[in-house]
Image (cartoon, rainbow, N blue to C red):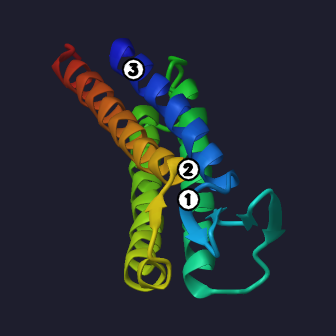
């Protein structure tokens, strides 16, 4: 059980760090505009060496930002629950800490999947036509890696929960 929780905690730490970095950085998309390179993130865009805040309130940026922030919050609370799962004293008899941590990591995975799906759909259908020479960049890729890490953290914690439940149910009363 503890090895699954340790693996889940490792995946969770890496996934949460990647989520925060992907959300905060401005390299989600790179493109060529008027002969010079430009890149944009969720919060600002850069033309050449000068960066500007994205002041327009465009729905897909707001949705992507909100889902990335929700994903980071779920992953952080999952880490807290995952650390508390190492403690042996059950505070709630009906609520298992490894199960709760796994649910939080799956919620984080769901939110980052929503964020990346919205960003991908709008970028490919709208911005892809607007900019001829464009590509997704490393912040966007970090979001996908974070999705995998939070998903595997949830899997590890669910395995730890199943092992704990099997031991609890097979123990003599």
Q: Position of residue 94 (x, y in %)?
A: 41, 42
Could you classify mark 1 by the number of other residues whose Cα lies within 10 Å: few (under 14), some (14-19), or many (20 or more)? many
N-terminal label among 2 and 1: 1
The residue positioned farthest toward the left in the image shown: 170
Given residues 86 and 148, the one toward you in this image is 148
Q: CA distance from mark 2 to mark 1?
A: 5 Å
CB under 8 Å between discs 1 and 3: no
Residue at the (56%, 59%) spot, across then down: 28
Can you see residue 10?
Answer: yes
Horizontal side of 45 relative to 2 (left or right) equals: right
Label 3 element class: helix
Q: CA distance from mark 3 to mark 2?
A: 24 Å
Residue at the (67%, 57%) spot, across then down: 26
Residue at the (75%, 61%) spot, across then down: 48
Against 27, residue 13 (above or below) is: above
**Residue tagged by mark 3?**
7
**Residue tagged by mark 2?**
139
Q: Kindly report which numbered mark, 3 or 2, lies closer to the viewer in this rendering.
A: 2
Q: Quadrant of the N terminus?
A: top left
N-terminal label among 3 and 2: 3
CB under 8 Å between discs 2 and 1: yes
Q: Position of residue 143 (x, y in %)?
A: 48, 50
Q: Position of residue 158 (x, y in %)?
A: 30, 35
Given residues 115 and 84, the one toward you in this image is 115
């Amino acid at each position: 059980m503890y090895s699954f929780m340790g693996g889940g905690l490792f995946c969770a730490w890496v996934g949460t760090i990647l989520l925060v970095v992907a959300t905060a950085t401005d390299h989600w998309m790179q493109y060529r505009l008027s002969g010079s390179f430009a890149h944009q993130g969720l919060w600002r865009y850069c033309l050449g060496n000068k960066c500007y805040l994205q002041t327009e309130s465009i729905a897909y940026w707001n949705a992507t930002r909100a889902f990335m922030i929700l994903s980071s919050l779920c992953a952080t609370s999952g880490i807290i629950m995952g650390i508390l799962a190492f403690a042996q004293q059950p505070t709630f008899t009906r609520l298992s800490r490894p199960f709760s941590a796994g649910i939080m990591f799956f919620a984080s995975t769901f939110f980052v999947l929503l964020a990346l799906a919205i960003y991908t759909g709008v970028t490919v259908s709208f911005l892809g036509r607007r900019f001829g020479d464009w590509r997704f960049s490393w912040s966007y890729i970090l979001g996908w890696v974070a999705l995998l890490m939070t998903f595997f953290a949830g899997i590890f914690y669910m395995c730890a929960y199943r092992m704990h439940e099997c031991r609890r149910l097979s123990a003599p009363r």
